[in-house]
C-alpha cells in the first residue's frame, strides 16, 4: 500500500467518529498550545530568539512599520508611533468586527494602507502563497503581544460571525467527510502521518512552517486542512475562514501569543 493510501486510510478512520458533542471551549487546564505537540527540537527552535526562522519576517515587519508608502507619504509609525507601546495587546484581539465586517489582522493592515496611507493593499505575487510584506507586518504586530493571552470578542456585533465559525468547525466537508472537531477535539494527541494531532489553536500564527520553508497565516493552514480532507479550499481572507479563525481563537482564549511559532 502506498504512503498516500495509508494516509488516506488513517484519515478515513477519523471520519468514523460521531460528532456527538456540541461546540464548547476546553477548560483552561485542558488547553495546550500547538507547541506542546511538536518535537522537542522544533520547540527548541521556536524558543531560540536567535535561531527561530520566523524572526526574519518580524524584522522585515519592523522595517516596513517605519517605511512611508502611498500617495499620503505616511508610514505605520506616523499614525501609531512606537509599535511596542501602540500595538501591545492588539494582535490578541483579532479577528474583530470593524465597520460591520469581520476582519483578520492582515485585512485590517491592508484597510489601513488603503484608507490612511492611500497605498495599494499588499497582495501576494504570482510566485507567493501569501504576501511576504503583509505576513511580515502581521507577524511584527502580533509579536508586540507575545506572552499575552488571546482575547477575541464574540458577543455583540461579533456574535453572528462567531456562530458561523462554530457551525463550520463542526461541519463535515470533503470526500473524507471530516470536521475540524474530529481531529482537534476527538483525536488531539493521536498520531497522523507520524505527527501528533494538535488541538488546532492559532495562538502561534503567523507561524514558520517547516514543510513550507516559510511563514504562513492560520488561514493558509486552514486551506491545507481542507486539502487533506479532499474538500475545496477557500481563498485566504474568505468570510468563512475569518469566522472559523474567530471561533478557533475563542477556543484558545487564555493561551499566550507565541507568534512566530515554529510548526511542522
Image (cartoon, rainbow, N blue to C red):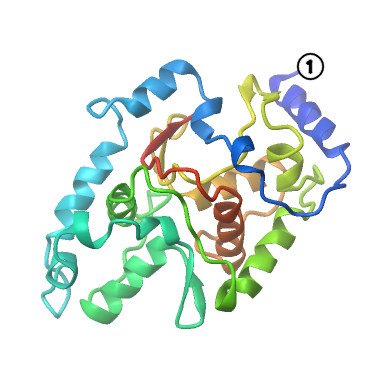
On the picture, is 237 further left or further right than 241? left
Location of residue 31 by image quarter? top right
Write down the residue under mark 1: 1
Q: Where does residue 224 sit, x and y in percent of width and height?
A: 59, 43
Horizontally, residue 166 falls left or right of residue 87, namely right
Could you tell me which residue is drawn at 41 percent across and 46 percent down? 206
Give me the residue at 59% from left, 72% from top.
155
Q: Identify whether 154 is placed above or below 179.
A: below
Residue at (44, 45) in percent of width and height: 205
Q: Position of residue 67 (x, y in %)?
A: 12, 61
Q: Quadrant of residue 41?
A: top left
> From what the image shows, is residue 195 above or below residue 186?
above
Number of marks drawn: 1
Q: Position of residue 153 (x, y in %)?
A: 52, 66
Q: In the rendered view of the protein, which quadrant contains the N terminus?
A: top right
Q: Is residue 59 left or right of residue 114?
A: left
Q: Which element carries disc 1, helix, strand or loop? A: loop
Q: Does residue 240 appear left or right of residue 65 in this picture?
A: right
Res. 201 image quadrant: top right
**In x, y percent, where is residue 95?**
48, 63
Front-lying residue, 28 or 121: 28
For mark 1, does the 10 Å Cα neighbourhood hold few (<14), some (14 to 19), or many (20 or more) residues? few
Amino acid at each position: 500500500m502506498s504512503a498516500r493510501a495509508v494516509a488516506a486510510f488513517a484519515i478515513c478512520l477519523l471520519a468514523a467518529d460521531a460528532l456527538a458533542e456540541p461546540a464548547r471551549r476546553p477548560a483552561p487546564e485542558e488547553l495546550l498550545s500547538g507547541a506542546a505537540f511538536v518535537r522537542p527540537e522544533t520547540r527548541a527552535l521556536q524558543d531560540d530568539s536567535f535561531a527561530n526562522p520566523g524572526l526574519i519576517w518580524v524584522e522585515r515587519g519592523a522595517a516596513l512599520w517605519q517605511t512611508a508608502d502611498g500617495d499620503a507619504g505616511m508610514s505605520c509609525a506616523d499614525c501609531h508611533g512606537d509599535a511596542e507601546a501602540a500595538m501591545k495587546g492588539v494582535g490578541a484581539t483579532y479577528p474583530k468586527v470593524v465597520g460591520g465586517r469581520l476582519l483578520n489582522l492582515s485585512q485590517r493592515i491592508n484597510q489601513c494602507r488603503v484608507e490612511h496611507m492611500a497605498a495599494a493593499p499588499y497582495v501576494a505575487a504570482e510566485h507567493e502563497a501569501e504576501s511576504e510584506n503583509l505576513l511580515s507586518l502581521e507577524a511584527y504586530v502580533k509579536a508586540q503581544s507575545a506572552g499575552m493571552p488571546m482575547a477575541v470578542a464574540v458577543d455583540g456585533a461579533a456574535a453572528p460571525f462567531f456562530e458561523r465559525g462554530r457551525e463550520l468547525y463542526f461541519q463535515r466537508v470533503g470526500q473524507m467527510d471530516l470536521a475540524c472537531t474530529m481531529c482537534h477535539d476527538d483525536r488531539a494527541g493521536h498520531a497522523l502521518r507520524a505527527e501528533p494531532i494538535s488541538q488546532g489553536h492559532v495562538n502561534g500564527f503567523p507561524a514558520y512552517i517547516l514543510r513550507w520553508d516559510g511563514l504562513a497565516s492560520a488561514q493558509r493552514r486552514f486551506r491545507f486542512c481542507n486539502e487533506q480532507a479532499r474538500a475545496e479550499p477557500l481563498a485566504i481572507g474568505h468570510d468563512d475562514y475569518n469566522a472559523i479563525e474567530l471561533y478557533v481563537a475563542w477556543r484558545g482564549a487564555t493561551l499566550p501569543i507565541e507568534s512566530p511559532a515554529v510548526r511542522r
